[in-house]
Image (cartoon, rainbow, N blue to C red):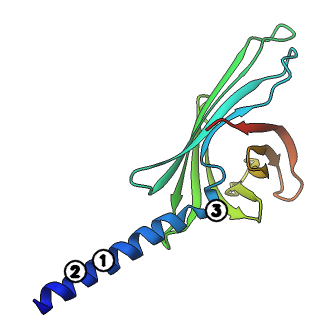
């Protein structure tokens, strides 16, 4: 009877610890998990899009899927951009890495840092390749600003695209 009691207490302790760690693992991402729709002006040349962040594989990864469209303008055809990014845990169990793929054949490896209201993904430095920085900033509980920047030296970044999105779900 003592052995069963000890095993039951040990199992409960393990389960409590495991589930507690899982929930806290993605704590800094909680505000970003869900479905988002970009604000658009509807003007020619202005694009629109949506993205989502969802936990997957028993909450071991966070998957972002994004879709945006830019209408034809000045003789240039309509552009459709789709991408997939997977945020994953490093060897210590912290979500500090991500890998990005898109329909334009780009692959970007990111490291992740956190501010109070921002999540910043910065690409690794590779010789003769620009450095990319993707920043999500919480504006309020239903709105986020997304900024994608590029740099040649890793210090002076130029904004490539920036926009606000509203939380749908």
Mark 1 element type: helix
**Image depth: mark 2 or mark 3 in front:** 2
Whether tag 2 and tag 1 are in contact, CB under 8 A, the answer is: yes
Tell me where residue 164 appears, x and y as whole percent: 80, 38
Asked whether, in this view, residue 95 is left or right of residue 167, the answer is: left
User: 104 and 59: which one is in front?
Assistant: 59
Q: Earlier in the sequence, mark 2 or mark 3?
A: 2
Report the front residue among 142 and 130: 142
User: Is 59 placed left or right of 137 in the picture?
Assistant: left
Q: Quickly name the residue at label 3.
A: 28
Q: Give the residue drawn at x 44%, y 55%.
A: 59
**161 to 139, vertically: above or below:** above
**Mark 2 closeness class: few <14, some 14–19, many ≥20 residues within 10 Å:** few
Give coordinates of residue 130: x percent, y percent. 76, 47
Place residue 50 in its image quadrant. Answer: top right
Give the residue at x 78% y 23%. Answer: 47
Give the SS element for disc 3.
helix
Q: CA distance from mark 2 to mark 3?
A: 32 Å
Residue that numbered label 2 is attached to: 8
Q: Which residue is mark 1?
A: 12
Frontmost of labels 1 and 3 is: 1
Q: Quadrant of residue 75?
A: top right
């Amino acid at each position: 009877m003592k052995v069963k009691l000890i095993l039951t207490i040990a199992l409960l302790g393990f389960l409590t610890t495991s589930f507690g760690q899982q929930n806290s693992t993605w704590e800094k991402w909680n505000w970003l998990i869900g479905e988002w729709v970009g604000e658009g002006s509807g003007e020619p040349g202005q694009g629109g899009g949506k993205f989502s962040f969802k936990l997957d594989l028993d909450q071991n990864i966070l998957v972002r899927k994004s879709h945006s469209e830019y209408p034809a303008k000045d003789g240039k055809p309509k552009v459709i951009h789709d991408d997939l990014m997977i945020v994953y845990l490093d060897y210590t169990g912290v979500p500090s890495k991500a890998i990005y793929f898109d329909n334009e054949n780009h692959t970007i490896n990111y490291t992740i840092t956190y501010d109070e209201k921002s999540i910043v993904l910065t690409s690794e430095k590779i010789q003769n390749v620009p450095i990319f920085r993707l920043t999500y900033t919480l504006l309020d509980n239903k709105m986020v600003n997304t900024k994608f920047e590029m740099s040649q030296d890793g210090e002076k970044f130029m904004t490539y695209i920036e926009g606000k999105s509203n939380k749908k779900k």
